[in-house]
Amino acid sequence: MRPPVRRLGAARALLLALALGALPAGAAGPGPLPVRLEARAGRLEAALDLSAVVAPGLEKQLGNGLTNVIALYVTVAPAGGGDVVALQGRVIEILFDVWEESYAVTVGDARAPQEIRRSFPDFRALRAFLADQEGIDLGPLAQLPVGPLVVEARVEVNPVSREQLQRTREYIANPVGGRPGGGGARSVLGAVASFLLREPDPGSDVHLLRSRPFERAEVTAR
């Protein structure tokens, strides 16, 4: 996997990382979500540190020989509150091969026309991959509003709602990229966001994370 931040000065990259929360985040606690941002070809890309969510205790669950699912929803919204201005979804399916003692992973992402398949020899390698979710396309940087923004993430381990998981897959197949430019697109994005980011079902393993505020001008183009 390529490094999430390239060709930034070391000091600038450090300041940006600190501004977005370089401390470990709690599963749903007050700690900020660590995020690294850069612009590639005019589009905002995010890399999220989900180490706090992908805890070592998940090894037993993810190694049970069944297909396990991690659903990730990432949004950009005004720091002071307001409508979501960018939304991206990702679905990661994990299957432990009890004979080979390795993990087969399938990633569904709007950036790839086909699902991405990976293999990891042990839980340590799998956890490193799951904890560093990079290349999350959040739409055209220039179309984000001026003012403090936040990146928010909702991480579900084995989602209880199959309907929501299906909607996520549909959204990945036909995303509404970036900040909506017209009323119709804005309505669609708002409807999708309100469904995907609704309150978690009782008993579900859901983590809600939020970065420190950042300004659009802080993101340096690659």
Image: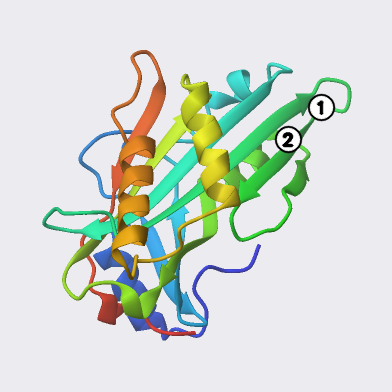
Placement of the N terminus among the 4 image quadrants: bottom right
Mark 1 and mark 2 in contact? Answer it, CB < 8 Å. Answer: yes
Left or right of residue 198, residue 113 in this image: right
The reply to whether residue 214 is in sight is: yes
Residue lying at the far front of the rendered structure:
184
What whole-number distance in Å separates the C-alpha atoms at marks 1 and 2? Answer: 7 Å
Residue beneath the point at 38% across and 59% down: 35
Give the x, y percent position of residue 27: 34, 34
Q: Quadrant of residue 198?
A: top left
Q: Quadrant of residue 113?
A: bottom right
Residue beneath the point at 27% across and 54% down: 84
Give the x, y percent position of residue 118: 76, 46
* Placement of 173 over or under 212, stated as above or below: above
* Placement of 119 over or under 1, stated as above or below: above
* 1 or 2: tag closer to the N-terminus: 1
Left or right of residue 206, residue 4 in this image: right
Residue identified by numbered label 2: 122
The reply to whether residue 157 is in sight is: no
- Could you say whether the residue bearing mark 1 is in a helix, strand or loop? loop
Give the x, y percent position of residue 196: 39, 38
Q: Amino acid at mark 2?
A: Asp
Residue lying at the far top of the rendered structure:
203
- Could you say whether the residue bearing mark 2 is in a helix, strand or loop? loop
Query: Could you say which is closer to the camera, residue 213 or residue 165?
Result: 165
Q: Amino acid at mark 1?
A: Glu
Label 2 Cα neighbours within 10 Å, binned few <14 / some 14-19 / many ≥20: some
Residue identified by numbered label 1: 101
How did the renderer colour the structure? rainbow
